[in-house]
Structure formats: C-alpha cells, structure tokens
Image (tube, rainbow, N blue to C red):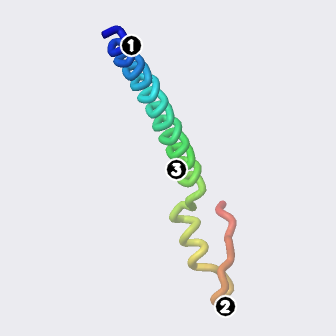
Amino acid sequence: MLHLLLLQLTVRLYTVVLSRLVLLLVIRIASETIHSWITIQTWIPSNDTLLRLHRGGGGGGETHIAPIH
C-alpha cells in the first residue's frame, strides 16, 4: 500500500515538473518568435521606399535606391 502511494506521489511530482518545463519551453519559443517577428517587421521597407525602388531613375531600366528626404 505504501509503495503504491509513493509511486503515485512520484508520478504526480514528475507530471508537475514536466508540465512546468514544457510551459517554460513554450513561453521561451513564443517570446523568441515574437522578438524575431518584430525584428523582421522593422526591416520591411515602407511603401514610399518600395515606390522609389520601383520607379528607379535614369529611365534605363536599372533600379536605383533613392534617399528619402
């Protein structure tokens, strides 16, 4: 009887510890994903920059990066 009780307590303890570890892992992955998504968002050029890149300059078909004033 005591052996069964100890086994149940051990399984319960392992379950709690494992669930906490999984939760921490999920939180860490989510925060890394959000951080990298924010970094990617800051590197996406604005519409103004895209229009300037598309228009280019000189009319020769080449693309020039025009500075934004």
Residue for point 54% across, 61% down? 46
Q: Residues within 10 Å of mark 3 (few under 14, many from 20)?
A: few
Report if the CB atoms under discs 3 and 2 are less than 8 Å apart.
no
Q: Residues within 10 Å of mark 1 (few under 14, many from 20)?
A: few
Comparing labels 3 and 2, the label whose residue is closer to the camera: 3
Residue type, mark 3 in image? Trp
Numbered label attached to residue 6: 1
Considering the image in quadrants, where does the C terminus appear? bottom right
Residue for point 68% across, 77% down? 64
Q: Position of residue 22 (x, y in %)?
A: 45, 34
Residue type, mark 1 in image? Leu
Report if the CB atoms under discs 1 and 2 are less than 8 Å apart.
no
Relative height, residue 26 to residue 60 (above, below): above
Comparing labels 1 and 3, the label whose residue is closer to the camera: 1
Q: Nearer the viewer, residue 12 or 3?
A: 3
Report if the CB atoms under discs 1 and 3 are less than 8 Å apart.
no
Relative height, residue 11 to residue 42 (above, below): above
Residue for point 58% across, 79% down? 55
